[in-house]
Amino acid sequence: MIMISYGLQRSASTFAYQIIYDILESAGHDQQELFDRYAGSLISAPFVKLEDFSLTSFAKCVPPERIILLKTHSFLNEEAARLIGSGDVIATASYRNPMDAAVSLYNVGRKERRKPENKKRKGFLEIDTMFKAIETISALLPVCEGWIRHSAVLPI
Amino acid sequence: MTNNTLMVARKIADMISVETDLNGICNRYNSDKRLIWEYNGGGSDKWKTQMTQQEKDLALNLFRDFIDKYC
């Protein structure tokens, strides 16, 4: 079975992923071993864009008693929504008060611009005003809402 | 670690029917950075001091619907 950890940007989505990862590992779902065995050529890393591969094909490869964790910021597309609805894929969605997500986005942009050139994360560099951070988070909220409104997704 | 972290970890463990040492897992991530995580749309209210009134007005205008529904 595939488990998806979606997160709104700047909502501790990596933290949520790490907690879930550790829970799965402690229960014997060795993520590296499972990934090596079942991901094949479908995906190259557990951080995925759902639009880049067939979730249906991947889900068919993984035995139901084994759980592989994927992390995404992607839009909940029809295929994923259907697989989650049928119980073939399970999912969590982390989110946060968008006021704080915007402040966090602005602050990370400020930190990134202070880093040496070779260590800067490009995606955050352009967030150089609070207004840009607010507008960016605003544009992402419909994606987040798509996940947390799905009745079978665990909002966290 | 916040109590919220443990509560969320419990919900996740229940969802996948796993019994494990959740305290141990959550304690691995016990740092200031992690305290930002709140449960179900909660927040630290940093925005109240970091945003100007103009920024707050724009943000509340854009986010009001989401906050009312989910936070």
Image (cartoon, rainbow, N blue to C red):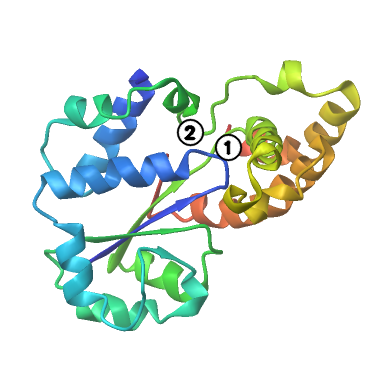
Q: Choose top left, top right, bottom left or bottom right for residue A155.
A: top left
Q: Residue at x 53, y 63 (%)?
A: A74
Badge 2 crowding class, 10 Å Cα cut-off, few under 14, some 14 to 19, many 20 or more, is: some
Q: Give above or below for A43 relative to A104.
A: below
Q: Which residue is mark 2?
A: B40
Q: Position of residue A10 (x, y in %)?
A: 57, 41
Q: Are marks 2 and 1 in contact (CB under 8 Å)?
A: yes
* Residue B70's disc number: 1
Residue at the far right: name it.
B54
Going by the numbered disc 2, the residue's amino acid type is Asn
Nearest the eye: B28 or A21: B28
Image quarter hosting the C terminus of chain A: top left
Can I make out residue B17 in this image?
no
SS for dot 2: loop
Q: Is residue B19 above or below residue B30?
A: below
Q: Is residue B12 left or right of residue A115?
A: left
Q: Position of residue A48 (x, y in %)?
A: 44, 66
Q: Say which of marks 2 and 1 sits in front.
A: 2
Q: Quick one: quadrant of the N terminus of chain A?
A: bottom left
Which x, y percent locates residue B6? 29, 26
Numbered badge on residue A15: none
